[in-house]
């Protein structure tokens, strides 16, 4: 069952994020992907995440398709204008990529090409609208397409530090859904009670919510995120649990696995993000019972 | 100077139609020079608005005030004495002026009557042309005093492109090719060798991609 059908069926979808290389050596990407083939419903390929120049998501998505995994690619407005964005969506479709997630691109000033000029021709809602319009057979200039891309459009919600920020993000998500978003990738889950409360508010959006489970990797990363990511809500208990473990790496994997297992009852899927530790995805899936 | 043009009357009327008393604020600087929002234009727009209201069987009270500079809080302060007698403010300044008024009077609706266009120069009577994008890292010293960032339609740093024909840009025969102008100017200066220099990929960090820019002059800060 492909991602679209599984999403429509209401079943729990498992997405794993895999990053493209900075260069053309794809062996690691292909190896990591092959290890999770058949165990995840789709792989999610970021497009120069965190503002770091690397192989485009379109290239990575095609590669994953060639490897027999269903790709979902990130698409955003920082590096392309509406012409390039629409052209890439059409290209992606004919090359085997039927799923896109419209994301907010990291600021150029925070990436590794800080002297580049950002494009920002459209915003997220503008791009979702454009993608939906393409699916309906018309481009942004109003011209009819010769063959329409039957794409699934997702969007994201950023992490939220407090209830006020969450309410603002829910309102924005409503606009994204109204524009054409068919599912939402929601922020990191480290605190299940907080996620349950989030779902109470988010379920009114009327589209599947797919929360993110992030592999913490170490005490340092957990501490850093707890201190500098106000929306992460990583408790001292979690940090202590990792610190006290004799195998801290495995403990992080267990935490991720347990979180995923808990989400099965509450959300309609999970996005597993490891940021460079894709080789540990199989272990996380093991722990999650997937 | 910053150039501007008045918005279409329908749009301005849409903004102010719910109100009975407005302050119409002009600016004595750039928008006066480009005949978009000075004292004279304030008077003209005031009359036009009042007539439009009368046509709809309504009345509009317009307090016409032209400030020395709307982008300067010191002058915006002059509106304090009048603001309580107005339901809204209609500004005929550039976007900087509109925002200064909005900042000073957070409880009062403020609307723009102009579209701010560009930083430019007067070409002839009634004609203004774009000259500067405010990119924050001026390269005019390399390009004979003619800016390819603002005046080349493709923003080419090493031009011209193949669309340059008889000194004109492919975008329109009315638009000069910036790189033709640069070449002619370098020739006139005897600096043809400068044209041989490759201008590296531009560093856009001084431009606005890091967010709204700010200048802090430590020697002037009180």
Image (spheres, rainbow, N blue to C red):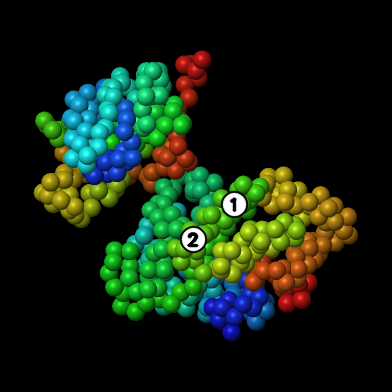
Point out which mark residue A176 bears.
Answer: 2
The relative height of residue B180 versus residue A50 in the rendered view (above or below) is above
**Which one is in front, A182 or B218?**
A182
Residue at the far front in the pictured view: B57
**Which one is in front, A65 or B40?**
B40
Residue A116 position within the rendered picture, expressed as x and y whole percent measured from the top left: 44, 48
**Which one is in front, A127 or B9?**
B9
Q: CA distance from mark 2 to mark 1?
A: 14 Å
Q: Residue at position x 64%, y 78% from top? A: A11
Q: Chain of mark 2?
A: A
Point out which mark residue A167 bears.
Answer: 1
SS category of the residue bearing label 2? helix
Locate residue B91 relative to residue B186 in the image: left or right. Answer: right
User: Residue A149 appears in which quarter of the rendering?
Assistant: bottom left
The relative height of residue A213 versus residue B180 in the rendered view (above or below) is below
Quadrant position of the C terminus of chain A in the picture: bottom right
Q: Chain of mark 1?
A: A
Q: Residues within 10 Å of mark 1 (few under 14, many from 20)?
A: some
Residue B107 position within the rendered picture, expressed as x and y whole percent measured from the top left: 46, 32
The relative height of residue A254 versus residue A137 in the rendered view (above or below) is above
Locate residue A13 relative to residue B213 in the image: left or right. Answer: right
Residue A20 position within the rendered picture, expressed as x and y whole percent measured from the top left: 56, 65
Residue A75 position within the rendered picture, expressed as x and y whole percent measured from the top left: 48, 62
Locate residue A106 relative to residue B85 in the image: left or right. Answer: right
Viewer-side label of 2, 1: 1
């Amino acid at each position: 069952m492909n991602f679209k059908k599984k999403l429509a069926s209401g079943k729990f979808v498992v997405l794993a994020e895999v990053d493209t290389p900075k260069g053309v050596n794809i062996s690691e990407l292909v190896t990591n992907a092959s290890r999770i083939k058949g165990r995840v419903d789709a792989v999610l390929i970021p497009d120069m995440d965190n503002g770091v120049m690397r192989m485009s998501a379109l290239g990575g998505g095609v590669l994953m398709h060639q490897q027999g995994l269903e790709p979902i690619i990130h698409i955003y407005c920082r590096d392309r204008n509406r012409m390039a964005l629409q052209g890439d969506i059409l290209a992606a479709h004919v090359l085997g990529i039927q799923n896109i997630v419209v994301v907010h691109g990291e600021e150029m000033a925070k990436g590794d090409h800080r002297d580049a000029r950002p494009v920002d021709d459209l915003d997220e809602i503008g791009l979702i609208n454009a993608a939906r319009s393409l699916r309906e057979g018309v481009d942004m200039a109003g011209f009819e397409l010769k063959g329409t891309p039957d794409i699934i459009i997702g969007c994201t919600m950023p992490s939220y530090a407090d209830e006020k920020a969450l309410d603002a993000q829910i309102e924005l998500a409503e606009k994204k859904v109204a524009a054409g978003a068919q599912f939402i990738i929601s922020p990191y889950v480290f605190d299940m009670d907080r996620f349950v409360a989030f779902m109470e508010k988010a379920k009114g959006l009327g589209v599947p919510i797919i929360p993110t489970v992030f592999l913490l990797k170490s005490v340092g990363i957990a501490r850093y995120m707890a201190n500098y990511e106000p929306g992460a809500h990583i408790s001292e208990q979690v940090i202590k649990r990792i610190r006290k473990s004799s195998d801290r790496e495995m403990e992080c994997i267990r935490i991720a696995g347990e979180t995923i297992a808990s989400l099965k009852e509450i959300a309609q899927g999970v996005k597993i993000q490891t940021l460079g530790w894709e080789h540990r995805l199989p272990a996380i899936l093991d722990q999650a019972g997937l | 100077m910053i150039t501007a043009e008045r918005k279409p009357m329908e749009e301005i009327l849409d903004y102010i139609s719910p109100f009975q008393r407005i302050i119409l604020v002009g600016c004595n600087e750039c928008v006066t020079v480009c005949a978009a929002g000075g004292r004279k234009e304030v008077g003209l727009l005031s009359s036009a608005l009042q007539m439009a209201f009368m046509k709809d069987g309504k009345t509009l009270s317009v307090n016409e005030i032209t400030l020395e500079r709307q982008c300067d809080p010191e002058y915006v302060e002059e509106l304090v004495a009048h603001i309580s007698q107005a339901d809204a403010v209609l500004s005929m300044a550039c976007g900087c002026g509109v925002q200064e008024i909005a900042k000073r009077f957070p409880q009062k609706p403020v609307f723009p009557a102009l579209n701010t266009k560009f930083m430019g120069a007067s070409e002839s009577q009634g004609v203004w042309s774009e000259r500067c994008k405010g990119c924050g890292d001026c390269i005019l010293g390399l390009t004979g005093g003619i800016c390819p960032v603002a005046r080349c339609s493709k923003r080419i740093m090493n031009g011209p492109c193949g669309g340059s024909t008889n000194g004109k840009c492919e975008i329109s025969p009315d638009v000069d090719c910036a790189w033709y102008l640069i070449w002619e100017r370098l020739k006139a200066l005897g600096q043809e060798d400068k044209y041989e220099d490759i201008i590296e990929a531009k560093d856009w960090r001084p431009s606005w991609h890091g967010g709204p820019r700010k200048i802090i002059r430590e020697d002037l800060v009180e």
